[in-house]
Amino acid sequence: RFYGFSENKREYDMDMREMVDKAKKKEPLYGTSTLTPHMQGVASRNSRYSALLLHIIPWFNFVNHNQ
């Protein structure tokens, strides 16, 4: 949503408003994960820097991990 050389101002403002609202309600910003801590670690390691190699191997990670 925010990748690119210039930010999309409308999307940035919408995201900031959404995050501030959740923080005021003391909710987790990205929801709660149903995975075990081990699987969250695996998902975190798999998604780290994955966008840099997107042109070689399309590797998408839609897992909500707390790490």
Image (cartoon, grey):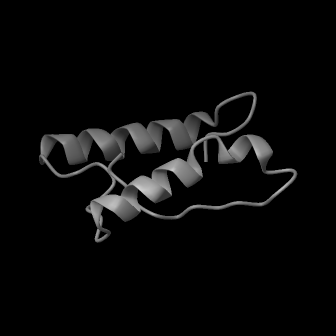
Count the marks. Answer: 0
Closer-to-camera residue (26/55): 55
Where is the C terminus found, in terms of image quarters?
A: top left
* Picture coordinates of residue 56, whole percent (x, y): 87, 52
Check the image and name the residue furthest to the right. 56
* Rendered image quadrant of residue 14: top left
Residue at 47% across, 50% down: 44
Q: Where residue 47 sits in the image (x, y, percent)?
A: 57, 51
Relative to 59, does residue 49 appear above or below in the rendering?
above
For residue 36, which quarter of the picture? bottom left
* 12 horizontally vs 18: left or right: right
Residue 44 horizontal side relative to residue 1, left or right = left
Residue that appears at 55% across and 43% down: 11
Judging depth in this view, the residue of 61 and 5 nearest the camera is 61
- At 20% from the left edge and 41% from the top edge, which residue is drawn? 23
Position of residue 22 measured from the top left corner of the image (x, y, whole percent): 23, 48
**How far across and down, in percent of the image, does residue 15 sit?**
43, 43
- Residue placed most toward the observer, 41 or 53: 41
Query: Measuring 61% from the left and 48% from the top, which residue is drawn there?
Result: 1
- Is 67 positioned to the left or the right of 3 in the image? left
Question: Compared with residue 27, is residue 16 higher up or lower down, i.e. above or below?
Answer: above
Q: Give the answer, above or below, for where 43 lies relative to 4.
A: below
Residue 57 left/right relative to 16: right
Extreme top residue here? 6
Q: Residue furthest bottom?
A: 34
